[in-house]
Each structure stands twice: as structure tokens, then as C-alpha cells.
Amino acid sequence: MNPLGVELFFTSISPSPHGRHPRVWPVAALVHAAKLVCHQARLARHELLDTRIISLKGGWNVTTRLVLAQAKGPFPGRTLARYKRRLAWLLGLGLTLLLGLYLLQPAAVPDLAHGNASGLEALASGWAKGDMIVLVRHVERCDRSNAACLGPADGITDRARAVAVALGARFEQLGLARTDIYNSPLTRTAQTASYMFSKVSSGDNWLFNCKGSMLRDALAHKVAGHNLVLVTHSECMAQLERDLKLATPTLGYGAALFVSTDTLDGTPKMLGSIEASDWRSVNLKP
């Protein structure tokens, strides 16, 4: 490592009376002094690098050059402190990045079936005023199940019929007097709507071909003072969640998404979801 550049010089030019022989005592004294300095330097983890006795005309020149060099390695305490600072900086950076990623993640859709009293209250209030948009996923499809089909293979299973009837009863409790109901044209959604509400629409393609347009089309069909129930597919429910800048978990068969249009700025608000199997734990009073 580079020296600190601190040098001590002890110099004696001791001419001989005859021009040939030096006087011994100044040289010995200076060498002794240099040794003492050298000893102290070693104690301080430095080294005496150079001691020279140079013959000059008419005498001797004794030069002791002491260079206080840096230690060959950093002191353990300083090294530890430096690494601690670096580690603290890296940890801080990591935590900042994690926090940033967390904040950038879309918000989750609230679960209305488990301990969400405020969400259920908002749902009941919004339903009573006719401010709700509800997306319901069709019940179990037969072509992806080993269960017996109710009818055509592209429809629902026979066991899913009872699930659809039970879901319809829940909406009946809320009240359907001021409710507009639509379903996609596919067999499984038409059958689900039939067993839920005892009615089937002619089928609306926008409830099947919904990429990038689900929220817009739903709002276009929403009548003021009327709730809107849409029997549709998981892809369209995920599209609505994306339109509202929310996470898009896959919802189960018969699940429902509840969106309120009664907001101060007019922007629809997701109240939450209820899975078909969770309705038994939901207490809704219009």
C-alpha cells in the first residue's frame, strides 16, 4: 500500500580532523535515536524503511528515513464498520424495492362472505337503491367435469342445477322487482340463468366477447334505479377486475362480483365477491 509520506530525517555531517576518519559518537548517537524511533513506529503498526550511512568527502552523512506506512490491511474495527454501513444500505434498498413492488400490485377484490360487515351493508344499501351491477359466473360446466350432464355437453352438469337454484333464491331474498337480467348466448350461461331466475334472455354477445370492454358495456346497459345482473364467464369477470385496476383471481363456478355505481365521483367501485359455497355465511337484508 502507498506510504503516508511522513518522513523523519536525522543527519550528521561529522568531519574528521584529518579528513578521513569520522567522529564516532555523533554517528552512534544518531543511530541509537533512529532505533528508538523505529521501535515506537513498530508499536504503532508502522515500519522504519530506510537507514543509510553515506560516505562524503571529509566526513560521514548518517540519514535515517522513517516512513509511516499504512497498515497492510485495514483495521478490523474499521472494516466491520464499513461492511455494516454497506449492509445497512443494501438492506434499505431491498426494503424500498419490496415496498415499491407491493404498492404497485393491484388491490385484491374484497371477500364479502367472511367478516366484511361494512361491505355487506354497502351491498344491501346499494341494492335497495338500484345502484348495483352484479356479474355471476355460470355454474359447473359439463365438458370439464366427469359428472353427468344436464343436457348438451357444452351446458352445465346435472348436479350444478341445484347450485343455480340456490343462488337464485339468494337474489330473490334481495328482491328482483327492479332488476334487469342478461346472460351470454352460450348454453352453460343460459341454463344457469334459467335455473336461477326462471328466465333467459336472447343472449348478448358482449357478455362473451368482452375483452377490453366489460365495464363499458355493463355501464351502457345499466338503467338508473335498477340493479343489473349479468350471467357470464370467468374471462369477463377478470376483464371487469382489470378495468377497475384490481387483481384477477380465478373465481369459482357460481361466484358473484358486486359493483356499486353509487360513488361521489361517478367511478364504479368494487364492493367484493361471494363464492357460491359461501352464501350460507352471508346475512343480507335489503
Image (cartoon, rainbow, N blue to C red):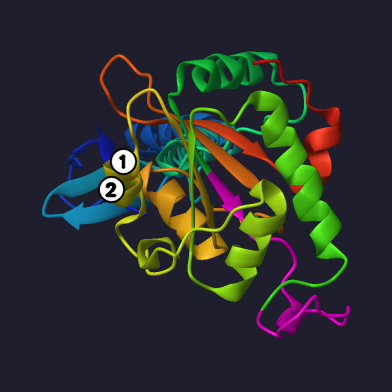
Residue 74 image point, x, y percent:
50, 43
**255 and 92: which is toward the camera:** 255
| In magenta segment, residue 2 | no
* CB within 8 Å, label 1 to label 2: yes
**Residue of label 2:** 216
**107 and 257: which is toward the camera:** 257
Residue 198 image point, x, y percent:
66, 51
Q: What residue type is labelled 2?
A: Arg
**192 and 54: which is toward the camera:** 192
- Point out the stretch of residues depicted in magenta: 135-154
Q: Distance between the residues labelled 1 and 2?
A: 5 Å
Q: Which amino acid does label 1 sit on?
A: Leu
- Give the quadrant of the C terminus: top right
Crowding near the residue tagged with mark 1, few <14, some 14–19, many ≥20 C-alpha atoms within 10 Å: few
Q: Relative to 36, does residue 24 appear above or below in the rendering?
A: below
Q: Is residue 261 left or right of residue 227?
A: left
Residue 6 image point, x, y percent:
27, 35
Residue with the most extreme left position: 57
Residue 160 image point, x, y percent:
81, 63
Q: Relative to 163, does residue 33 appear above or below in the rendering?
A: above
Which is the main secondary structure of the residues drawn in magenta? loop
Q: Relative to 278, does residue 240 appear above or below in the rendering?
A: below
**Residue of label 1:** 219
Residue 284 in view of the camera: yes
Quarter residue 10 falls in: top left
Residue 45 in view of the camera: no
Q: Which residue is drawn at 59% across and 64% down?
A: 189
- Give the quadrant of the N terminus: bottom left
| Residue at disc 2, secondary structure | helix
